Image (cartoon, grey):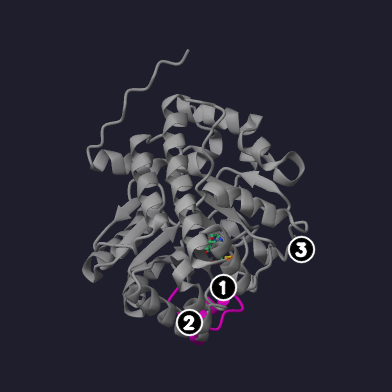
Amino acid sequence: MSETTRYASLRNKIDNEVLNFVRLQQDLAERRLVWESRPSYLEFSFNTACNLRCVMCHQSENPPVVKAPEGRGEALLAWFGEHGTVWTPSATSEPLANDPAKLLAFCEQHHLFLELITNVMLLKPEVIDKLLPRIQRLTLSIDSHEREVIERVRRPVKYDVLVQHARYALARCNEASVATNVHIVLMMDNVRVLGDFIDWAAELGARDVTLLDMLDNTPQAAQMSVWRNLPAETVHEHIRRMIERARVRGLNLTLEIPAPLGGRYDHQPNIPRAHSAAVIEKLHDVNARAHAGFCPMVSNYLKVEPDGTAYPCCRAPRELILGNVWKDGIDAVWNGAPMQELRKRMFSGDLPKPCVGCYVVEAPKWDAEARGFTKRAPKPTS
Ligand SMILES: C[S@@+](CC[C@H](N)C(=O)[O-])C[C@H]1O[C@@H](n2cnc3c(N)ncnc32)[C@H](O)[C@@H]1O
Ligand code: SF4
């Protein structure tokens, strides 16, 4: 493709992304059930392979690897690529277990950016160097700063390799103004040293850390859950220490846990590289506050597993399955009966059970309140 053709195609794509956001505004304002807008974010991987077997993850049960049927993934990316912006190439799997050159080629072809959430082991310096221009945000899943804990929880991680890869990747992203995040899943193994984790992460080069509440994805979840094994006040004390260390180290901290401590604790500006993915993300942030109560993922996200099962969000509760895009067709799922029912419930504030109290739907409300953002009066339902 010549430079001129490439530029024209990029300009056309950016117009489509903005037009898609405008259509979303119309869909929301008119309280439509069948939408003209499409997702800006897609979570999809060609397979479910992972190189690790972390104890809190579904992969610990050694599920068989599922692959998308030949050509289907490519068709999904082409559909998404017309209006979409950010691709998360995961399926409760490791994105870098795919060929990074293939990921890059799809991004180039459809002008997409990557939300790369990785366990770091395959993130060699040459891989981050190659992918860097196409990364919207790099998230490193680490879970502990203690060698013995990491190597036991995220097996078979090698602590020294992880630290070497993470340090290099964070430095490269920081100098290129690419947003980063470090994930730590809250569990019995790390709850007592959350504050120390922040100090360690700051020294590693992290600017943002996110504490994730552990989802009940494995048979061993009950014995790893802090909420089931410790008094809530004890858990809160450890988390308060984490908040305090983040303040002292000037690190941004997101607590994806229920109230009263859940939310964002910002201590430094995170000014991203200017490109369409950064602009679209900002627009969706503002939109989430303006329509607080309507889950932002339901408005802009689609998750498709390699077997075709589609969900409206990354948490993928079975109760919210939208259909199967390989069997029913992508448009038929995006505007199908389960999706229409979910939109109806979001508009009326009658959230399905898995959505009640979920951080994704709650956080924009806290944010909107903190900023004194006025919600538009709801239209009377006919
Ligand atoms: C399923 S992984 C897929 C991407 C990649 N393999 C990784 O580990 O980063 C996505 C994120 O989910 C987190 N995760 C794994 N098990 C979880 C659980 N039971 N509850 C909440 N988050 C979990 C991981 O730590 C990671 O940050
Ligand atoms: S958390 Fe990520 S790295 Fe760990 S087993 Fe699950 S998918 Fe693999």
Q: Residue at x 34, y 74 (%)?
A: 174
Residue, disc 1: 154
Labels 1 and 2: the sequence-earlier one: 1
Apparent side of residue 359 relative to residue 243 in the rendered image (left or right): right
- Name the front one of labels 1 and 2: 2
Residue, disc 2: 165
Q: Nearer the viewer, residue 192 or 114?
A: 114
Residue, disc 3: 64
- Name the front one of labels 2 and 3: 2
Q: Amino acid at mark 2?
A: His
Quarter of the image holding residue 108? Answer: bottom right
Q: Amino acid at mark 3?
A: Pro
Apparent side of residue 9 relative to residue 305 in the rendered image (left or right): left
* Residue 157 magenta: yes
Residue at mark 2 to residue at mark 3: CA–CA distance? 28 Å
Above-or-below relation of 278 to 300: below
Q: Residue at x 25, y 62 (%)?
A: 269
The residue at the far top in this view is 382
| Residue 236 position within the rendered picture, expressed as x and y whole percent measured from the top left | 34, 56
Segment tinted magenta in the rendering: 144-160
| Residue 171 position within the rendered picture, expressed as x and y whole percent measured from the top left | 37, 79
**Circle 3 Cα neighbour tier, 10 Å, few/some/many (<14 / 14–19 / ≥20):** few
Labels 3 and 1: the sequence-earlier one: 3
